[in-house]
Amino acid sequence: FSNDGYTTVLTSLIVDKKSSIVLYGATIKGRELAPRIAARLSLGLIADCTGLSINKEKQLVQTRPTFGGNIMASILSPFTRPQMATVRPNTFPKIKLKQPKKGNVEKIIVKLEKQSIRTRIIEEISSKTESINIEDADILISVGRGIGSKENINLIYEFAEELKGTVSSSRALVELGWTNHPIQVGQSGKTVSPRVYIALGISGAIQHLVGMQTSDVIIAINSDPEAPIFKVADFGIIGDLFEIIPQFLKIYRKDKGS
């Protein structure tokens, strides 16, 4: 993958096709590529959108969290074309089509000069650090500040092991140093869409909700009945997670053993 090469080719293609809207995946490569193309074409770029729609004027309405995730902003690009945005993987649920549809694939012949590639790879070094990809997890057990202390997270790992799930966390625990950034869910972490998402001691701030609200089933346990997490939860339990989780494990193990 060459940023220089892809930027040159895609910029020419966008100009040639007179595109109205261009969307990029907010992946590592997408986040490198999109701003370069936007700069070449002197366009705006809305990053990490959590909502996209078309208004009556056929403008792309790009929605994303702003001001630290405290509000959701809907942004328009009325004076320039194309309108460009990046969208995180797992932000939107998969649409179930009644009938299969097939798009037209058009092959484009491009001419790329050698001098267009200004960088080259000298060496590739693979990281030996074991990383957990929470984006691929089928069951996620996510823990927040309500866990109380770093030592209490051991209970969550025990819970996750029984359910054959993966542990993730809110930003609050990463900032406290209790968990690591690769397992953070939310606006400044990862966007996930597991089959089951269990939120333990997570209040449900907007910046966290945008990272998990497309999960198939959301289960929340929180002692605060007014916690925003309950607004998106399919099942909610109001209570002390240190009483609920041990009781659940006891019943689950008993049923599993019988």
Image: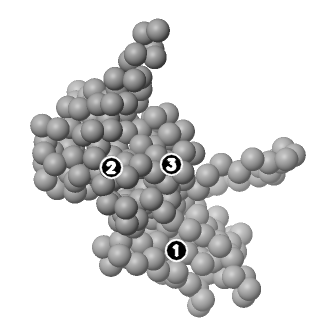
Position of residue 251 measured from the top left corner of the image (x, y, whole percent)? 39, 23
Residue at figure coordinates x 41%, y 23% from the top left: 252
Q: Which mark is residue 53?
A: none
Position of residue 255 measured from the top left corner of the image (x, y, whole percent)? 46, 17
Closer to viewer: mark 3 or mark 1: 3
* SS state under label 1: strand
- Amino acid type at circle 3 is Phe
Packing grade of label 1 (10 A; few <14, some 14-19, many >=20) is: many
Whole-angstrom CA distance, mark 1 to mark 2, is 34 Å
- Amino acid type at circle 1 is Thr
* SS state under label 2: loop
Residue tagged 1 = 63
Marks 1 and 2, the one that precedes in the sequence: 1
- Amino acid type at circle 2 is Gly
Residue tagged 2 = 239
Closer to viewer: mark 3 or mark 2: 2
* Residue 133 left/right relative to 51: left
58 and 132: which one is in front? 132
Residue at figure coordinates x 23%, y 27% from the top left: 128
Closer to viewer: mark 1 or mark 2: 2
Residue furthest toward the top? 258
246 and 182: which one is in front? 246
Whole-angstrom CA distance, mark 3 to mark 2, is 13 Å
Q: Say whether residue 34 is visible.
A: no
* Residue 228 left/right relative to 150: right
Position of residue 64 measured from the top left corner of the image (x, y, whole percent)? 46, 72
Residue at figure coordinates x 46%, y 35% from the top left: 139
Position of residue 58 measured from the top left corner of the image (x, y, whole percent)? 72, 82
Instruction: Using the rendered view, name the quadrant where residue 21 is placed.
Output: bottom right
Residue tagged 3 = 235
244 and 146: which one is in front? 244
